[in-house]
Amino acid sequence: MRRSVHAVLVFVQASFAAFHVFGKHILHEVDPMVLAALRVSFAAPILFAAAWFVERHRPAWRDLLHLSYLGLFGVCLNQLLFIHGLERTTATNAAILMPAIPAFSAALAILFRVERLSWLRGLGIVSATLGAIVLVDPTQFELDSDTAVGNLLVLLNCLSYALFVVLQRPVLERVPPLTLTAWAYVFGGLGVLVVAGPTLVATDLTSYAPLSYAGIAYILIVPTTLNYALVTWAIRRSSPTLVSTYITMQPMFAATFARIFLGEALGLHQLAGFVLIVVGLLLVVRSRQSS
């Protein structure tokens, strides 16, 4: 497997980790429906134009059905569930729940016969997932009436994203990655706009603080547009299990950012989490090379 795939996946998870920080700050001022509508309104036309310019592929009619449910799981439900969940729970809770994605992805890959789970790959997923849980310290998880709904929405978001990651692998045998991402955004974006469009139209977008505009710009350009294309590109060149296992790096990067920018010290449990995540990723990579 080319090193570029691993480099891309590291970048994606580092930038998604930053999304947790920006997103939680922005949602104090920006309605989650507005942010969701802005994301699809920005990304869909850019991705569609880029796909046509680079790949010039017209999906067959039978593939449009597959692209529509990828848009439902990967864009519509994923974005609406995550934004509303993040608004109703804590950033720590959201980080603790993210490691559910590799577990969901592994189970779904077996269920839909997209991959076979070897003992080495399974051990790697367990190690990386445990590392992420240890790193974010599950004792900080809050479960009360205020956060319970948010926790459930984030967990459903994890399941929805896992479906998106796994189900696109067979479609990538017929549809180029940028075209797949663009059409998924078109279908999923329409669903988002049906729900969130009226809120966006009724909102005065000139009233936000400068820092909120900077955060919105980052979310629109990197996690929303660039990362979706990069994830699909990586899945085509690797596997859903590998891509989803890299998600365990998100809390690792979040802890690193906190150390660099906030001066927070790294404890032994965080260092142990780092080690478990790295070992887990190495096992998953090794299992793919030996299969």
Image (cartoon, grey):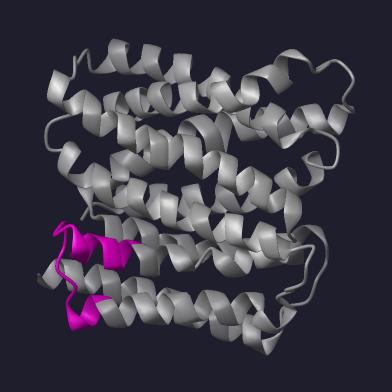
Magenta stretch containing residue 120, yes or no? Answer: yes
x and y percentages locating residue 4 in the rendered image = 32, 47
x and y percentages locating residue 141 in the rendered image = 70, 75
**Range shown magenta:** 105-121
The C terminus - image quarter = bottom left
Which is nearer the eye, 65 or 98?
65
x and y percentages locating residue 96 in the rendered image = 61, 70
The N terminus - image quarter = bottom left
Q: Is residue 246 above or below residue 205?
A: below
Q: Is residue 187 above or below residue 116?
A: above
Which is nearer the eye, 162 or 235?
162
Q: Is residue 246 visible?
A: yes
Q: Residue at x 58, y 40 (%)?
A: 80
Q: Is residue 258 above or below residue 71?
A: below
Q: Is residue 64 above or below residue 267?
A: above
Q: Residue at x 16, y 44 (%)?
A: 170
Quarter-of-image position of residue 252? bottom right
x and y percentages locating residue 10 in the rendered image = 45, 54
Q: Residue at x 69, y 65 (%)?
A: 148
